[in-house]
Image (cartoon, grey):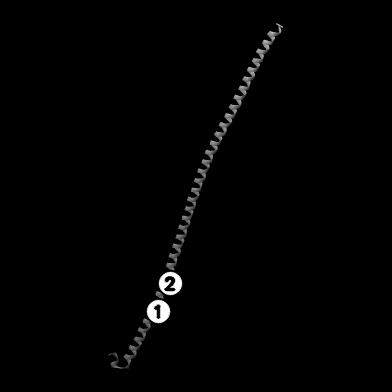
Amino acid sequence: MAASQPNKAKAEWGEEKDAASEEQRLMERAAKKLREEDAAEARKNKDEEHKARMDEWQMELERRRYEARIKENDRKTLEKRKKEYEANFKKMMAEGAAKREREHQRFTERVKEEASKMRKREEEEEEERKKKKGKGPCSTQ
């Protein structure tokens, strides 16, 4: 029995050593698992922050594009109105010039008619004077 006792003590010591190493391995595995979970959580938080920054950046980009579209539409509208105004102005000027030309033609025609009437009256008056001159000496008076 004496021989078996030291073996027992060795076995107990070996068991304690195995139990301690088993405990150490469990602690290492738990620590590794916790480190991995912490790393995964940190990556998740970092990814969420990155996604939030990207979303903010995307919203800012969309806002700038929207403002640029509005400015471009305003510019196009203003340019269109300017062209319409210029076209209407040219049209009004052309109509005004045509109206003045028509009025000038009418006036010229009236002047010609009046000149013709005056010439006709003068001719008639001249003929009457000639006729009166030929009637006698008193016709000139």
Residue 95 picture quarter: bottom left
Q: Nearer the viewer, residue 13 or 131?
A: 13
Residue 25 in the figure: left or right of residue 110:
right
The x, y position of residue 81, in whole percent, is 46, 58
Nearer mark to the viewer, of 1 and 2: 2
Residue for point 50% across, 49% down? 69
Residue 5 in the figure: left or right of residue 74:
right
SS at mark 1 in the image: helix
Q: Nearer the viewer, residue 22 or 83?
A: 22
**Vertically, is 55 above or below 122?**
above
Crowd class of label 2 (few under 14; some 14 to 19; many from 20; radius 10 Å): few
Residue farthest top in this picture: 2
Which quarter of the image is occupied by the C terminus?
Answer: bottom left
**Vertically, is 56 above or below 103?**
above
Crowd class of label 1 (few under 14; some 14 to 19; many from 20; radius 10 Å): few
Disc assigned to residue 132? none
SS at mark 2 in the image: helix
The x, y position of residue 73, in whole percent, is 49, 52
Residue for point 65% across, 17% down? 19
Residue that label 1 marks: 113
Residue 8 in the figure: left or right of residue 135:
right
Residue 90 picture quarter: bottom left
Residue for point 57% across, 32% down? 41
What's the residue type where badge 2 is placed? Answer: Arg
Kindly indicate whether the residue at mark 2 contacts the one at mark 1 (C-beta within 8 angstroms): no
Disc assigned to residue 102? 2
Separation of residues labelled 1 and 2 (CA atoms): 16 Å
Which quarter of the image is occupied by the N terminus?
Answer: top right
Q: Nearer the viewer, residue 36 or 114?
A: 36
Of mark 1 and mark 2, the one earlier in the sequence is 2
What's the residue type where badge 1 is placed? Answer: Glu
